[in-house]
Amino acid sequence: QVQLQESGGGSVQAGGSLRLSCAHSGNIDSSYCMGWFRQAPGKDREVVAGIWVGGGTTYYADSLKDRFTISHEWIKNTLYLQMNSLKPEDTAMYYCAAESCPGLPYGGTWSWSADEFGYWGQGTTVTVSA
């Protein structure tokens, strides 16, 4: 069983920064991929960034890779999302997700879509004002 708990959301003005955290417990090991997703009101859930925690391979949505950074710290069993130069369109509920992806290190495919992930946190709200 895997448990995920996000924190770090809040309200910030455009141009500001936030760091989201996702503390995890349970059976997450080096075979896992973890990701950050977001869902704005009236919109579909979209991937923000992902990471293979066993080797550090990362994935970013093209429109966000210059402003957002995903990282993982084993000592604290925590996934992070550093968000800089925030814009009002970044306003959304942000979710942490995890799933075993044992084939990825060996050239297997992993789409980083929400459908790939079976474990989800409750989400943390990010509001960016103009």
Image (cartoon, grey):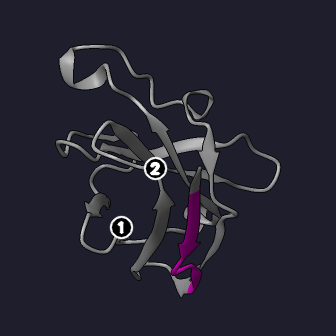
Contact check, label 2 and label 1, Cβ < 8 Å: no
Q: Which image quadrant is residue 46 in?
A: top right
In this rendering, position of residue 42 left or right of residue 6: right
Secondary structure of residue under mark 2: loop
Few, some or many residues within 10 Å of mark 1 (<14, 14–19, 20+): some
Q: Tag 2: residue type?
A: Asn
Q: Residue at x 45, y 31 (%)?
A: 112
For this rendering, which residue is in front, 18 or 51? 51
Secondary structure of residue under mark 1: loop
Residue ranking furthest to the top = 108
Residue 6 % position (x, y): 56, 70
Residue 121 % position (x, y): 63, 59
Which residue carries the number 1 mark? 77
For this rendering, which residue is in front, 25 or 73? 25
Task: Give the number of the mark in front: 2 or 1.
Answer: 2
Whole-Å distance between the Cαs marked 2 and 1? 11 Å
Numbered range of the magenta stretch: 3-11
Which residue carries the number 2 mark? 27
In this rendering, position of residue 89 left or right of residue 34: right
Residue 54 % position (x, y): 22, 43
Q: Is residue 62 visible?
A: no
Quadrant into which the C terminus falls: bottom right
Q: Residue at x 67, y 43 (%)?
A: 45
For this rendering, which residue is in front, 73 or 68? 73
Q: Residue at x 30, y 49 (%)?
A: 65
In this rendering, position of residue 76 left or right of residue 110: left
Q: Tag 1: residue type?
A: Asn
Q: Going from the N terminus, do you reach mark 2 or mark 1 first?
A: 2
Q: Residue at x 19, y 17 (%)?
A: 106
Residue ranking furthest to the right = 42
- Magenta segment includes 73: no
Q: Which image quadrant is residue 44 in?
A: top right
